Image (cartoon, rainbow, N blue to C red):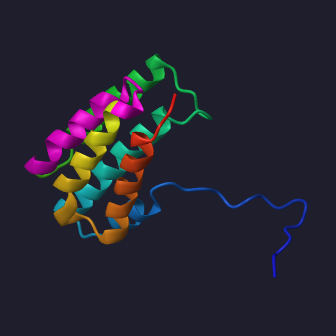
Amino acid sequence: MPVTLPPYALPAPVFRFRNLATLAGRAPIGGAREVALACFVAARLVNDCCDPLLALDEEARVARCVGAKGWLGTIAIPTPVRAPVAKLADASANGHPESMAPLVAALAKAADAFLDAAARSELDALATQLARWKR
């Protein structure tokens, strides 16, 4: 039976990449947590720069890219994951989904040993979404 919300109720918020965030919150301090956080930040950068509701301009995308790269440089990301995360952050500045899809897939592959199945599936879904993107 469907539940009817009262007229003053707010709709449930949509939270993308909840499994990556959950993994980052539950993982012990160190490699797995750092990788989950890096993947979460990269996924949010990519998702937000392609979101038509946000409609980020080039200046905003570049500013977010620079800020994210500065932050990513301060955490201890394992070497195999560092390059794909940096490439994805750089690519988010241009806002071209078709160029980011293979980079998301490469990040998912590089981070596979650190991610659980649910977090990995979010990156795979994002790569598929970007590959199908039509401007």
Query: What is the x, y in percent for residue 4?
Result: 86, 71
Which residue is most to the left? 79
Which one is nearer the viewer's eye here, 46 or 29?
Answer: 46
Question: Relative to 121, is 48 above or below?
Answer: above
78 and 84: which one is in front? 84
Q: Is residue 59 magenta?
A: no
On whether residue 85 falls in the magenta region, the answer is yes
* Residue 52: quadrant of the picture: top right
Tell me if 104 is positioned left or right of 74 in this view: right
The quadrant where residue 46 appears: top left
Let me know if residue 30 appears in the view. no
Task: Give the residue displayed 64% in from the left and 57% down from the top.
Answer: 13
Picture residue at 51% right of the left edge, 20% below the top: 57
Q: Position of residue 111 (x, y in %)?
A: 20, 56
Place of residue 12 in the rendered image (x, y in percent of width and height, measured from the top left): 69, 61
Task: Tell me the quarter of the image containing the N terminus.
Answer: bottom right
Front-lying residue, 54 or 64:
54
User: Which secondary structure is most common in the magenta stretch?
Assistant: helix
Q: Vertical placement of 48 versus 111: above or below?
A: above
Above or below, 123 relative to 45: below
Residue 18 placement (x, y as % from top left):
46, 61
Query: For the point 84% across and 68% down, which residue is it?
Result: 5
At 28% from the left and 38% from the top, the residue drawn is 71
Magenta range: 79-98
